[in-house]
């Protein structure tokens, strides 16, 4: 359905994330992957969605001047926002343990921004999902870290993994967003293209 509508465009996903690539396959879209190394540093005064908006645009700006007229570049960034602080990917197992301990018995926000860039303009959308964890025992956290090694994930967890099944008590908003892509909003944006 959407694939036919987009046949005059060429979609480029600038993400090495296997989950984001899978989402695009599951949306039944034709796309290619182009990657660039970006240092994901943001100004310290930014808060919540301002951070992910900034980083999604930063990733897109690396392709400035390289896009052809029919190409749409898609970049995104996800953070966990908790206690007025951005939690990115953990630095090491100790950091991951501390992050999960802080999320235990609390509600946090998962924020994903997506930037759609053409050779003439950029548009950024974002989604915020609230996730509540039950109390996580030290034993459960250690088990999860040892068996699932979630060191490539913002907030040190994947909701689609064991910890999501046993630890998450409530979600308000998009489940796909917690996995790194607000697929409904991406679909809607692409579906509304001229």
Image (cartoon, rainbow, N blue to C red):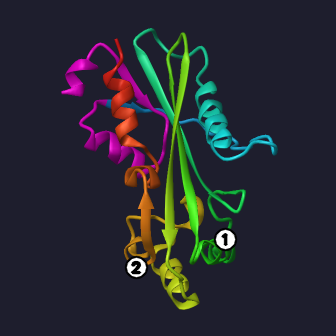
Instruction: Give residue 123's position: percent from left, percent from top.
Output: 53, 23
136 left or right of 187 in image = right
Residue indicated by mark 1: 92
7 left or right of 148 in image = left
Examine the image and state in which quarter residue 155 appears: bottom right
Q: Specify few, some or many for label 1: CA neighbours under 10 Å numbering under 14, 14-19, or 20 or more.
A: few
Which residue is rendered at x = 38% and y = 31% of the image? 32
Say which element carries label 2.
Answer: helix
Q: Specify few, some or many for label 2: CA neighbours under 10 Å numbering under 14, 14-19, or 20 or more.
A: few
- In magenta, the rendered stretch is 1-30
Which residue is rendered at x = 58% and y = 88% of the image? 138
Which residue is rendered at x = 38% and y = 64% of the image? 160
Say which element carries label 1.
Answer: loop
Report the front residue among 170 and 183: 170
Which residue is rendered at x = 34% and y = 16% of the image? 9
Instruction: Give residue 98's position: percent from left, percent from top.
Output: 67, 76
Depicted 24 relative to depicted 194: above or below? below
Depicted 130 relative to depicted 166: above or below? above
Depicted 111 relative to depicted 70: above or below? below
Examine the image and state in which quarter residue 30 appears: top left
Residue 139 magenta-drawn? no
Circle nearer the N terminus (2, 1): 1
Depicted 26 relative to depicted 3: above or below? below
Instruction: Give residue 73's position: percent from left, percent from top.
Output: 47, 25
Report the front residue among 109 and 87: 109
Label placed on residue 166: 2
Label placed on residue 50: none
Q: Are marks 2 and 1 in contact (CB under 8 Å)?
A: no
Label 2 – label 1 distance at C-alpha: 23 Å
- Residue extending farthest to the bottom is 139
């Amino acid at each position: 359905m959407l694939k036919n509508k987009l046949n005059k465009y060429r979609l480029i996903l600038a993400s090495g994330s296997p989950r984001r690539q899978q989402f695009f396959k599951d949306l039944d879209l034709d796309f290619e992957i182009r990657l660039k190394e970006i240092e994901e540093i943001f100004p310290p005064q930014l808060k919540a969605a301002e951070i992910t908006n900034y980083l999604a645009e930063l990733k897109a700006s690396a392709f400035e001047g390289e896009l052809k007229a029919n190409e749409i570049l898609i970049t995104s960034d996800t953070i966990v926002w908790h206690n007025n602080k951005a939690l990115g990917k953990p630095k090491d197992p100790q950091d991951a343990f501390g992050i999960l301990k802080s999320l235990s018995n609390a509600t946090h926000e998962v924020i994903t921004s997506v930037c759609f860039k053409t050779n003439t303009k950029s548009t950024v959308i974002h989604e915020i999902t609230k996730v509540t964890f039950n109390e996580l025992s030290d034993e459960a956290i250690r088990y999860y870290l040892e068996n699932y090694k979630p060191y490539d994930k913002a907030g040190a967890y994947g909701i689609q993994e064991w910890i999501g099944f046993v630890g998450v008590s409530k979600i308000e908003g998009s489940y796909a967003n917690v996995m790194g892509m607000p697929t409904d909003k991406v679909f809607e944006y692409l579906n509304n293209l001229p």
